[in-house]
Amino acid sequence: MTTSISHPARFSGLAAASTAAALFASPFAVNAQESTPQPLWEIGAGALAVSQQAYPGAAQRVGRGLVLPYLIYRGKIFRADRDGLGLVAIKTPQYELDIGFAGAFGSNSNDIEARRGMPDLGTLIEFGPRLKWNLGDGPANGRLRAEFAVRGVFDLSDGFSNKGISFEPKLIYERAAGPWRYSTSAGLIVGNQKLASTFYGVAPAFATAFRPAYNAESGLIAWRLGANLTRQLSPQVRIFGFAQLNTVAGAANSASPLVQKRNGSTLGVGLLYTFAKSGTLVTN
């Protein structure tokens, strides 16, 4: 969802078929202004192409192309939208607390030089609460909000084994201008020792002359800046693009031998086609 850690590929997770449709919308379905009524639900399909770092600090990039169904549902309690799949526990004009899911692609370690011979980075599922704080009007008739998400991380490829806990605070600016919708965000990702070890730890059994053993530490994993843009071409068709910059500068595990590049980026473009939508309109 929704949605919420960006290691090996958080940019629309595909952890399970039940969540794929909701998560597929996450990079590009930028909210309209809160006062703009929107359909209760939308069903369609879309195509997405992404190029990104294998994980924050990786020297290599990976590319993915996807064609998937998608679902958006804007219910008062159940939500499936750009932020993922989840339940709204508390909602006021200023605050919202939800409990949701998010996902992350896996990566084959043999395709990543620094991790060759190590366990793969599996497909991850995240689950936990998130607090949204609406900060009101921003520049140029936009809106500002802060988000604070705490989620447990589980490996779908390894029997849902626990991979740690992440904390992701971020500040988001959103604006609508005619057929255009865009948002920018700034945030960071913090992980406990178990999560950090998943990405940056090197057990003695996997140490080599070029990859010494390393005990990962809890703390900052990466800083992140993001931007999303979407344009409605017709009632059924919209195009989108997104970009994200990551840096491990000052991160707790920047000294890991698996960190080979301080800065990295993610770029994606795509198209979304809506087959059907609800005649009932709701306001987020």
Image (cartoon, rainbow, N blue to C red):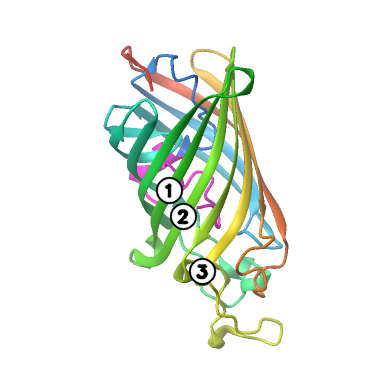
Q: Quadrant of residue 244?
A: top right
Magenta-colored stretch includes residue 71? no
Q: Residues within 10 Å of mark 3 (few under 14, many from 20)?
A: some
Expressed as whole percent of the image width and height from the top left, the position of residue 7 reads 55, 57
Q: Which residue is mark 3?
A: 218
- Give the camera-side residue of 150 and 26: 150
Return the mark for residue 149.
1
Q: Which residue is mark 2?
A: 167
Location of the C terminus (image quadrant): top left
Among numbered discs 1 and 2, the one appearing first in the sequence: 1
Query: Between marks 3 and 1, how big is the CA–CA gap?
Result: 17 Å
Rendering coords of residue 212 (x, y %) = 65, 84
Whichever of labels 3 and 2 marks the residue nearer the N terminus, that label is 2
The 10 Å Cα crowd at callout 1, few under 14, some 14 to 19, many 20 or more, is many
Residue 14 locus on image (x, y percent): 44, 48
Question: Magenta span covers which residues?
Answer: 1-23
Q: Label 2 near label 1: C-beta < 8 Å?
A: yes
Indicate whether 104 appears above or below 20. Answer: below
| Secondary structure mostly taken by the magenta-highlighted segment of the chain | loop
Of mark 3 and mark 1, the one earlier in the sequence is: 1
Amino acid carrying label 2: it is Phe
Rendered residue at 55%/57% (across/down): 8
The CA distance from mark 1 to mark 2 is: 6 Å
In-image side of 134 versus 234 (left or right) = left
> CA separation, marks 3 and 2?
11 Å
Front one among 150 and 229: 150
Q: In the image, 209: left or right of 100?
A: right
Do the residues bearing badges 3 and 1 touch, measured as CB atoms within 8 Å? Answer: no
Q: Residue at x 33, y 12 (%)?
A: 279
